[in-house]
Amino acid sequence: MKKNVYIGITATLIAVLFVSALIAGCTSTPSKPAAVTTTAPAAATESAQSTLVIATTTSLYDTGLLDYLQPMFEKQYNVQLKITSQGTGKAIELAKNGDADVLLVHSPTQELAFMKDGYGLNRRSFASNSFLIVGPESDPAGIKDMTPEAAVTTLLVKGTNKTAGIAFISRGDNSGTHSAEKTVWKNAGYNYTAQVQKSGVWYVEAGKGMGETLQMASEKNAYVLTDEGTYLAYKKDLKLTPLVSKGASLLNIYSVMTVYNDKQPVEKIQMANNFINFLISKDTQAEIGKFGVEKYGKALFIPMTVEVPTAKEGWVGDYSTPATAVAPATATAPATAATTA
Amino acid sequence: MSDITNGIVQAIDLIITLDPEVMQIAVLSLYISLSATIIAALIAIPAGALIHFNDFSGKRAVIILIQTLYSVPTVVVGLVLYLLISKSGPLGFIGLLFTPQGMILGQTVLIIPIMIGLVISALRGIDRGISDTLVSLGATQFQMIIEIVREARFAILSAVVLGFGRAIAEVGVAMMIGGNIRDHTRVLTTAITLETGMGNFALSIALGIILLVIALIVVVILNLITSALSSDMQQIAGGGPHG
């Protein structure tokens, strides 16, 4: 028995030695795989070059706009952008925890709450487009070209009547797109949780990303509210056609804000402000207005310089004033800490 | 259907042309998951042996706990680690979030239970008859353990291979800790998720095929190492001073 214990202790010691040797080796190894690739310079100089973490939503990132703009900004400011795309909820949590320096989303209500709670500075809107209600070509509910409110009302009435072939698939995940859908229901005069969510089998909550939700709707011949970018990306694989695309409540506004907390170094805040100013600059706005034309035959975004949408008060943020604030106007102690840092 | 055939064609094309972005993603996946597998194996094999060769009270409970942890969802491992290494978390000062090192840590934590559990099962499967025989032949404790581990080598290899498989195939930790940042923390699984989200199904299938090709290479190499090791071990066990 004693021997067993002795052997066990020796084995553990050896394991600990191995692991510590490996961890020590680990810190030098990451450069190895990078050295093989073309991206080596960026990875190697990482410690010297400053980085800026951008938290954004999958539906925006999936359009490819940020990957397109990234090299332009990196070159202009000699900074490395790290863009992470997550669900809207997680992107906001990342920003709140100080794990991101810039938040880029399309959910005005959640953005305004984020700003009100003091997590953000310099909210600016930089582009917009429209959500679409898409559905089967045959349009069994007959909602084509209705207002969004009339369309969802028709769907709800016919859906709860168990009219054959009427189904609606919702994201059901509190994403920016799901928030937009809830706004349409609200504007149509319905209480979402009481009158829509539990209204029957016709209303399906997918709990999935936009692409998967669209595929599900296509398989089930159902209606669905989608952002235009994802719809265009998936179009060729879908048996769905746009039916409703006009109406104030289908407006999709993209905004950007600097993440603020008292531990955030002022240089990061200034770099985040640079990114915001880059997005609202005349040149970048022109690039945004052209983006997608080649691939989809039409621009995916309407830059603010082309058209400022009319929406509920506060939903469209400032789009022309340069972002300069490095601390909230009202804060006192954290502000001095940030400026002296 | 056409997406699957297109995917196969595209996979071959990406491999032949050594597409730099795909190669970088593949190399990073391999680096992260292999590192996690090695670290986990170095912890799990001795730990499994320690648990197996010792009798202590609560041994059964420890084994049950380890087996329960087989089922831990990858996203939960990712989430718990995220909360620990977030800037507002207790270990935020290390700066592991959105780094390959953070992903190695996450995958290591993820696969350690399954490796320890399978190592214990592997040793248990061999131990029964052989230990008595060895002791009756006058083997020392050390020789006995070496011999049992040698006999169990292929089952232990399975534990390591399964750990590697779970590491390279998982999305939850890679997404939560790595963040799928291009050129930095994007690995094959998060790239597949991304491309599927963008409607590029053929490319997703192609990346899946590349992942399997990498797994094939790793498994073949691990098998070769095991065969080589077993002959070395035979020498150690047979050539010991008390033999």
Image (cartoon, coloured by chain):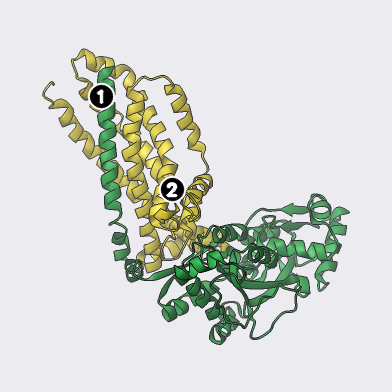
Chain colours: A green, B yellow
10 Å crowding of disc 2: few (<14), some (14-19), many (20+): many
Tell me the element at label 2. Answer: helix
Q: Amino acid at mark 1?
A: Tyr
The residue singled out by tag 2 in the image is: B106
x, y percent for residue B233 = 20, 32
Gap in angstroms between the C-alphas marked 2 and 1: 31 Å
Q: Residue A6 has which mark?
A: 1
Outermost residue to the top: B136
Tell me the element at label 1. Answer: helix
In the figure, is residue A215 to the left or right of B125?
A: right
Residue at x 36% of width, y 26% of height: B51
Residue under mark 1: which chain is it in?
A: A
Image depth: mark 2 or mark 1 in front: 1
- On screen, A50 above or below A166? below
Residue under mark 2: which chain is it in?
A: B
Residue at x 43% of width, y 36% of height: B113
